[in-house]
């Protein structure tokens, strides 16, 4: 039996509840993972989401910052919530579906503006977060799992609009890419999006600063869907709904989708 997932940095689930409802109506993924919800859990507008078939939610919330939620049409049982680097932030939630698949929803720290931990504490926190993630996967080899979310790193040259220009820009620096690769290798994770779309530039984020974001197309692929090797071959139908970035009062991220025959 197959199921579909989507990951979307919503940049305020309450402000953009209408956009979430629209995506639920138009695409209806079985599992929708949101990041940067910016809301206490009890204020997430679940009544409207339940009316569209999303009866189950596990989440971690904060007022005005961070926040992750997994909304599901199927029952889901919370199994973990990591606070890597001890930041005290709501950046991870994991749940197990009835088919035995564990879904990890992450919001990795953005890392600030300067890629130097000596002058930018946030960049150091990002690297530490990824290091602890790597160590966790090393010690707790994941199986039958999907890891997705806003990982805030565009790892490949064709995950950004201009590789050379972005080498010193946070989200595409070599040290970040290496830290993410080590975390990926530690869990034997397979990048499902790139398994399906191995070639070409694809993006999931475009800055609010660009007036003509689509025409300029200076994007980055910051949002990812990974799966453990034991189920990676079941993954398919990856896509990014670029047009959602053009909806009224949008998030600066577009939702990323994949399906699994499990």
Image: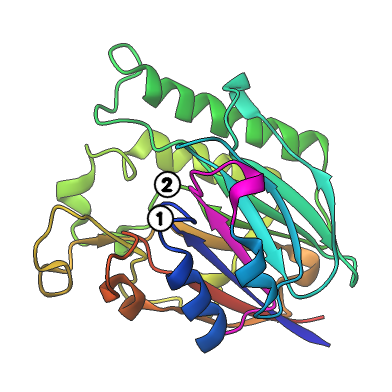
Instruction: Identify the element where label 2 is drawn.
Output: loop
Q: Horizontal and vertical percent for residue 201?
A: 30, 71
In this picture, residue 225 sits left or right of residue 218: right
Location of mark 1 (residue): 222
Residue displayed at 48% across by 65% down: 17
State the SS at label 1.
Answer: loop
Task: Give the image quarter of residue 30.
Answer: bottom right
Q: Check if residue 29 falls in the magenta segment.
A: yes
Q: Residue 210 lies in what quarter of the image?
A: bottom left
- Membership of 155 in magenta stretch: no
Q: Which residue is mark 2?
A: 152
Side of 167 where 103 appears, left or right:
right
Q: Residue furthest top?
A: 118
Q: Horizontal and vertical percent for residue 19?
A: 43, 71
Name above or below for residue 165 compared with residue 226: above
- Quadrant assignment, res 131: top right
Q: Quadrant of the C terminus?
A: bottom right
Question: In percent of the image, x 65 and y 62: which residue is there?
Answer: 46
Left or right of 133? Residue 129 is: left
Q: Which residues are magenta?
A: 27-44
Question: Looking at the picture, how far across and down is residue 130, in whole percent?
Answer: 55, 34
Is 105 rendered above or below residue 18?
above
- Is 101 placed left or right of 94 in the picture? right
Q: Please report the residue visible at 73 percent of the width from the left and 80 percent of the height from the top.
A: 234
**Viewer-nearest residue: 173 or 30:** 30
Q: Residue at x 65, y 36 (%)?
A: 134
Residue 249 tag number: none
Please say if the residues under marks 1 and 2 sit with CB atoms less than 8 Å apart: yes
């Amino acid at each position: 039996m197959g199921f579909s997932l989507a990951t979307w940095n919503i940049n305020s689930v309450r402000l953009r509840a209408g956009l979430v409802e629209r995506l639920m109506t138009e695409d209806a993924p079985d599992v929708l993972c949101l990041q940067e919800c910016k809301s206490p859990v009890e204020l997430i507008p679940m009544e409207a989401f339940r009316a569209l078939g999303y009866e189950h939610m596990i989440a971690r919330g904060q007022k005005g910052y961070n926040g992750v939620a997994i909304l599901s049409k199927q029952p889901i049982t919370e199994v973990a919530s990591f606070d890597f680097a001890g930041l005290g932030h709501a950046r991870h939630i994991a749940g197990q579906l009835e088919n035995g698949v564990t879904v990890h929803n992450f919001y990795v720290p953005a890392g600030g503006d300067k890629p130097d931990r000596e002058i930018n504490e946030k960049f150091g926190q990002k690297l530490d977060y990824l290091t602890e993630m790597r160590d966790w996967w090393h010690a707790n080899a994941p199986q039958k799992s999907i890891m997705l979310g806003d990982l805030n790193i565009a790892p490949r040259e064709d995950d950004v609009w201009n590789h050379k220009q972005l080498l010193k820009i946070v989200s595409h620096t070599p040290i970040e890419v290496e830290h993410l690769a080590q975390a990926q290798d530690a869990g034997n994770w397979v990048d499902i999006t790139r398994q399906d779309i191995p070639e070409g530039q694809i993006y999931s984020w475009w800055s609010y600063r660009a007036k003509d974001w689509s025409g300029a197309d200076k994007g980055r692929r910051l949002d990812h869907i990974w799966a453990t090797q034991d189920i990676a071959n079941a993954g398919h139908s990856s896509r990014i709904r670029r047009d959602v970035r053009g909806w009224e009062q949008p998030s600066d991220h577009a939702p990323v989708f994949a399906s699994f025959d499990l």
